[in-house]
Amino acid sequence: MHRDLQEKEFFSRHALGVVPVLKKATVGVAGAGGLGSNIAVALARSGVGKLVVADYDRVEPHNLNRQYYFRDQIGMYKVDALKSNLERVNPFSEYEMHNRLLDKENIPRIFGNVDILLEALDSVDAKLMLLQSWIAAFPQQPLVMGSGMGGYGGNNGMVSKRLFDKVYVCGDEKTDVAVFPPMAPKVMIVAAMQANMALEWLLDGEVIV
């Protein structure tokens, strides 16, 4: 059964004062794969007013074991499929999608107006490039990275910590997905940790780690 959804109904279980703060927030998500798609869904459900997401890839069958996509979206660009899914989850937020391969030139342009950036890229080289580009362009803006989400198990080894200044990392920091193929639970744990850290920053103005 489908019926019109009212915004106040959607957020009726949120704590007092949370909705107006998050409604004004803009969060960047660099990547729309296992981490990025699940981060975006968590933030959309939380009521972040605007998400800026960048990815250049298409949905493939092997993505479906851990990424927030569906069978009928195979072959679609991830940013298009994800926008459709986010709008189904929360139609009250804005979703700015960029079908782009991120590089050091376009990162400041795409994410220049976000309050916080969440990194969700695949390779170590891409992560390092984003880190260097971000701190060079926006040294006072927070960045939350993901590192170590391969395989399964190891719940007690999942950590959130400050790398330096306003750069943070979530994950076990040791399992390489090239060695330990990623599975949904661990990927979603790290995505949730990153999204939760973003909420902490937006709502409290700091991250306690």
Image (cartoon, helix red, strand yellow):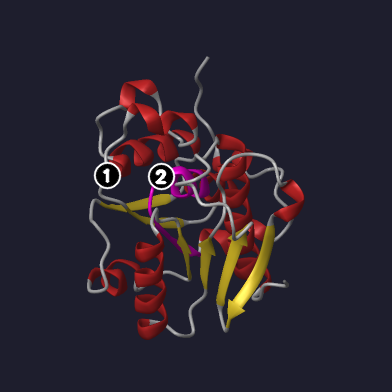
Picture coordinates of residue 13, whole percent (x, y): 72, 43
Residue ID for mark 2: 33
Residue 58: quadrant of the picture: top left
Return the x and y of residue 36 as percentages of the image width and height.
Answer: 45, 49
Pointer 1: what residue? Answer: 57
- Quarter of the rendering containing residue 106: bottom left
x and y percent of residue 134 in the render?
A: 39, 76
24 inside magenta stretch = no
Q: Residues within 10 Å of mark 1 (few under 14, many from 20)?
A: some
- Circle 2 packing at 10 Å, graded few (<14), some (14-19), many (20+), is many
Under circle 2, the secondary element is loop
Q: Pointers 2 and 1 in contact (CB under 8 A)? A: yes
Q: Secondary structure at mark 1?
A: loop
Q: Nearer the viewer, residue 139 or 96?
A: 139
Image position of 150 (left or right of 117): right
Q: Residue furthest right?
A: 156
Magenta region, residue range: 25-39
On screen, residue 66 above or below 112: above
Three-letter code for the amino acid on which mark 1 is drawn: Asp
What distance separates the C-alpha of mark 2 from that of mark 1?
Answer: 9 Å
Residue found 56% across the figure and 36% down from its top: 184
Residue 97: image location, x then y, percent? 30, 51
- Residues 154 and 201: in front is 154
Task: State the residue at coordinates (49%, 45%).
Answer: 179
Q: Earlier in the sequence, mark 2 or mark 1?
A: 2
